């Protein structure tokens, strides 16, 4: 009787009796669960299609968790490599905006200089050196010191860009020479100011810090 009641709950997925996060629901009602995964990122994580349906959020989560778990961390799914590569290729500006937000989050969190961010992904430097260069310049101004996006394809792509754009190299050199690193004095007033300007969404790409880390670790 209990089994029949539980199956009835699984089949209707109504209200508080919605168990579509479960693998049993995905097995027997795959189309319904798949549609929900497209709208709900947490279900996408649970069913291994986070990168397929929510690539921007998956990228932001990876950047955040690479800070917490190690620079080579990936949300590994059956087709995550394919979707990650497609996202970076098709949305480089959005991907680099996420990098900028993550660097500034790390600065707020640690209150130390952030000279670089390491990513294991190739393509951003090779395919979009102008966008990466612009990102580095923006962050240098915001951080008060030089910044580098470090990737496997950076050395060759950066050298080629610098050789082709000597004026940009000079402008960057002049900018860096004019900067003074931001200071992070301690004290309650500074902590309060940070808290006021750094809400949960800034610290957590999904707006749910506790769930994001656990879900990504399970992915």
Image (cartoon, helix red, strand yellow):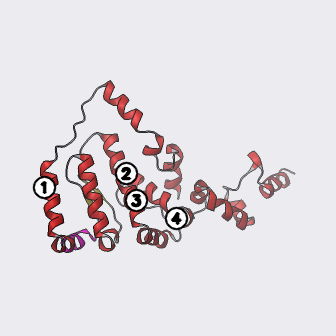
Q: Which residues are magenta?
A: 150-160
Name the front one of labels 4 and 1.
Answer: 1
Identify the residue position indicated by label 2 in the image: 102
Q: Is residue 216 magenta?
A: no
Residue in the image at 12% along x and 51% along y: 177
Gap in angstroms between the C-alphas marked 1 and 3: 36 Å
Q: How far across and how far down the image is residue 173, in percent?
A: 13, 58
Identify the residue position indicated by label 1 in the image: 174
Q: Nearer the viewer, residue 183 or 151?
A: 183
Residue in the image at 23% along x and 55% along y: 147
Of the image marks 3 and 2, the number of the one nearer the N terminus: 3
Residue in the image at 38% along x and 51% along y: 101
Q: Are marks 2 and 1 in contact (CB under 8 Å)?
A: no
Q: Is residue 159 magenta?
A: yes
Res. 98 image quadrant: bottom left
Helix, strand or loop at mark 2: helix
Residue in the image at 69% along x and 63% along y: 26
Identify the residue position indicated by label 4 in the image: 51
Name the front one of labels 1 and 3.
Answer: 1
Gap in angstroms between the C-alphas marked 2 and 4: 19 Å
Of the image marks 2 and 1, the number of the one nearer the N terminus: 2
Identify the residue position indicated by label 3 in the image: 73
């Amino acid at each position: 009787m209990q089994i029949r009641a539980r199956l009835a709950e699984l089949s209707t997925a109504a209200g508080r009796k919605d168990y579509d996060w479960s693998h049993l629901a995905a097995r027997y009602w795959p189309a319904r669960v798949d549609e929900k995964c497209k709208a709900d990122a947490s279900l996408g994580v649970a069913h291994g299609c986070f990168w397929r349906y929510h690539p921007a959020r998956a990228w932001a989560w990876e950047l955040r968790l690479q800070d917490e778990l190690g620079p080579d961390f990936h949300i590994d799914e059956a087709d995550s490599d394919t979707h990650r590569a497609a996202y970076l290729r098709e949305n480089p500006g959005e991907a680099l905006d996420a990098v900028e937000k993550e660097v500034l989050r790390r600065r707020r969190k640690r209150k130390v200089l952030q000279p670089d961010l390491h990513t294991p992904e190739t393509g951003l430097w090779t395919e979009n050196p102008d966008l990466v260069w612009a990102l580095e310049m923006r962050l240098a101004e915001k951080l008060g010191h030089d910044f580098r996006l470090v990737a496997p394809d950076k050395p060759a792509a950066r050298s080629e860009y610098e050789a082709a754009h000597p004026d940009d190299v000079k402008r960057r050199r002049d900018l860096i020479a004019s900067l003074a690193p931001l200071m992070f004095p301690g004290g309650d007033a500074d902590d309060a100011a940070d808290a006021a300007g750094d809400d949960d969404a800034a610290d957590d790409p999904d707006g749910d810090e506790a769930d994001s880390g656990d879900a990504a670790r399970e992915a």
